[in-house]
Image: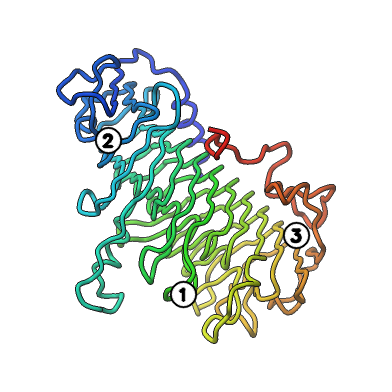
Amino acid sequence: MHLKTLAAVLLAASLPAPGHAADYFVHPAGDDHDAGTQSRPWRSLERASSAPLAPGDRLLLARGGAFTGTLTVSASGSPTSPITVGAYGSGAAPRLMNPFFAESFGRIIAVSGSHIVVENLYLYDTPTPAPDPLPVRWQDSVQHKNVTQLAALLVDKGAHHVVVRNNEFSNALVGVRVRGSDSLVTHNYFHDAGKITEQWGAIAIAIVGPDNEVSFNRVDNYGFYGGAYANDGAVVELDGEDPDYRARHIHIHHNVSHNVKGGFLEIAGKSDDVLIEHNVSDDVDKFVGGSNVRNIVIRNNTVLRTRLTHITHDADFPLRTVFWTFNDKGDDEFHVSANLFVLDATQRIYKGPEHKLGIVPRTRSGNQYYSANGVIATMLGLPLGADEVVAAPVFRDAARGDYRVRGQRGAGYAGAYAPDQPLWHAGLLPGAR
């Protein structure tokens, strides 16, 4: 993995820029003909997009202000002097929206430069692509293809070492899309986004490029019931948009998600070397799925699937699945170890008689399984491993989202949080801003 590289990105982003050159300010009561200083700020995102940014500069939007349109950041910082896009003043985070798909595909911030930090902003209400004029197959649908252009915040192909942190995304159908490399999406809050099309539920974070990290984010209420797949949406999707893009060498850790329809992670294109660890996923349906994948390591996650009892199951979707693959060659490489699964009886875990699309892990060890209303032997599909257990966990405070297990060190399960690791808190949740 590329953790040392990303740690260096965070360290550089937190340091004061040597020889700090300039701050540029944007305020809804400003004037685009002014100098962009704090006393004479610009007004629009369009004007801010042409700021002559250089390494160490900051582009700052007024707290309490509201802005519409697209902010483009094409300049680059340096490893020791990143360019920062953020907030100034006091009060609520700057509110940015773009409800017009015809304007940059509805993107609110588009980053094509490198060594950029985007922080402390509120992005919301992105548009849905226009439907096709006549009913067409989804394979021929322009609307379907345009979904891959959606992003409230885009890190474009060629951009690298971009940090997206401490932002809030509300009703952003695709929150962050990373086509570039060596970038970090961390400590953000994504919530309340639903249907895009019949084929797509909302996606909090789409990773398309290689060598990227997703960590310490919270995602609530993404995706929708209905559509082509009964329910759809994702916390993270590793998506190969075209043959030039391939999400590989990805680290997804210490994220918390609740009530995401469609599940936690979907790998839509070929991918390899993906590490998924220390996440809490209290969602609907799938945890991880993908086809033609290599070295997918899934360890020390807490997976809760108990939100299904009120959902009507039909003939096409009678059961729910924790893991899945469409690859019938049997050569996917999943490694599943030291995870805790708390499941509704309708869930099926690995490949078995009732779950033909299930995975057969290359390695599997130290997992713990529990269902209050089901038979784990039936739900597994495969025999219980010699070092795996079926046992009820005792969470510290599940009602408040603390899913660490009291006094348990058995079965190899180390918990969704490393020892002394605090629960996720970006300071952006209601009441904590």
Q: Secondary structure at mark 1?
A: helix
- Mark 2 or mark 3, which is nearer the start of the sequence? 2
Residue linked to disc 2: 73
**Residue at image x 77%, y 76%?**
375
**What is the three-letter code of the residue carrying label 1?**
Tyr
**What is the three-letter code of the residue carrying label 3?**
Gly
Q: Which residue is at the front of the view, 184 or 318? A: 318
Q: Reply above or below: 224 against 87.
A: below
Q: Is residue 326 left or right of residue 285?
A: left
Inspect this view and state whether residue 78 appears.
no
Residue linked to disc 1: 229
**What is the three-letter code of the residue carrying label 2?**
Val
Q: Secondary structure at mark 2?
A: strand
Q: Of tags 3 and 1, which is closer to the observer?
A: 1
**Residue at image x 43%, y 32%?**
93
Q: Quadrant of residue 259?
A: bottom right
Residue 378: give its label. Answer: none
Residue that protrudes farthest toward the right in the picture: 407
Residue linked to disc 3: 366
- Mark 1 or mark 3, which is nearer the start of the sequence? 1
Inspect this view and state whether residue 366 appears.
yes
Give the spatial CA distance, label 3 vs label 1.
32 Å
Neighbour tally class for label 1: few under 14, some 14-19, many 20 plus, Cα within 10 Å: some
Neighbour tally class for label 2: few under 14, some 14-19, many 20 plus, Cα within 10 Å: many
Q: Reply above or below: 344 against 417.
A: below
